[in-house]
Amino acid sequence: MLNPLAVASADDEIETIRAFNRFYTNRIGVLDRAFMHTPYTLTEARVIYELAARGTSTATHLTDELSLDPAYLSRMLKAFTTAGLVDSIRDPDDGRGRLLSLTENGRAVAADLAHRSRERIATMLAPLAEAQRHDLTAAMQSIHALLSDEANSPIVIRPHRIGDMGMIIAAQSKAYAEAYGWNGEYEALVSEICATFLRNFDPAREQCWIAERDGRLLGSIFLVKATEETAKLRLLHVDNAARGQGLGTRLFDECISFARRAGYRRLELWTNDILVAARRIYIAAGFTLEKEEPHHSFGKDLVGQTWVLDLTLPGVQAV
């Protein structure tokens, strides 16, 4: 039997998305017959954009890429050809097909459409503060990641390699600035941790793990040597696009397993009490709070916490 509360919740989600769709399509003028005050509809502008971006294409590709009716696209391309915007030549790989491309006039139209689009978006963003713009773009990135085909691709966890530290510094600095208003002091701290890790890297006793999907950084974690018996867990981070998928727990599992294999007896981490989601992972893994104290860092008054895990206790397992 269906749970009435679950049904109501699903209905609320659907109506929220429908309301957003109505708001956003109206906000960006999707329904306007003259898209951005040009003679073209949104669909026509998308076809022009695809041809500009790809250089050459086929009608079959455009039909598949834009989910268009073939007959409708054929009429559109014929009108574009008559207007001198599109040209076609025989496809050397398919004698029955034609390769489509924009003419010089077509490329000028594409450039004008791109300019108008950027101006419209800039006007929409102008009233927003910098932090609000960051929130908006981050939310759009999350929507894109969750609803795209990429969301079905597996998340891979691998050791670090050249170039990863720059991505980690950028991702974490931006994430904490946007979520908690932390200033450049935090970026400096992350940079120092990454630089020290690279200078002193001992692969037998230290490691950094990168979580990625289709080459996009989604998370990271470090294990570094403190003493012969104690290791420190540092810079656990999971991107908003990967939250709720157990990635933080997977990264923790890698870290704890490695620490035990490397012969450490104790694992420590330092965090702040406002990082609630991460703290749940620590507790689930068996960490206990050893001490906490207030401090002023990253432009904020915070409460720092030190959590520890005794790896010698019976029953202590990776997450």
Image (cartoon, rainbow, N blue to C red):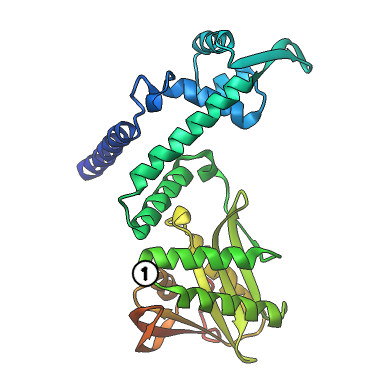
Q: Secondary structure at mark 1?
A: loop
Question: Where does the image place residue 40, in percent across and percent down from the top left?
Answer: 44, 19
Q: Residue at x 49, y 11 (%)?
A: 72
Report how many numbered discs are placed on residues in the image: 1
Q: For this view, does 201 lie left or right of residue 290?
A: right
Q: Residue at x 65, y 91 (%)?
A: 228
Q: Quadrant of the N terminus?
A: top left
Q: Nearer the viewer, residue 30 or 249?
A: 30
- Answer yes or no: is residue 2 visible: no
Q: Nearer the viewer, residue 90 or 104?
A: 104
- Answer yes or no: is residue 119 visible: yes
The quadrant where residue 199 appears: bottom right
Which residue is label 1 attached to?
Answer: 181
Q: Answer above or below: position of 12 versus 269.
A: above
Question: Where does the image place residue 98, in percent across and percent down from the top left?
Answer: 69, 13
Q: Answer above or below: position of 248 versus 154.
A: below
User: Few, some or many C-alpha atoms within 10 Å of disc 1 (few <14, some 14-19, many ≥20)?
Assistant: some
Question: Where does the image place residue 75, in percent across and percent down from the top left?
Answer: 52, 8
Q: Residue at x 54, y 78 (%)?
A: 233
The quadrant where residue 89 appears: top right
Kindly identify the amino acid type of the residue bearing the numbered disc 1: Gly
Q: For this view, does 205 lie left or right of residue 10?
A: right
Question: Where does the image place residue 299, in percent across and percent down from the top left?
Answer: 37, 78
Q: For this view, does 102 lie left or right of residue 276?
A: right
Q: Which residue sits furthest right?
A: 92
Q: Nearer the viewer, residue 286 or 297?
A: 297
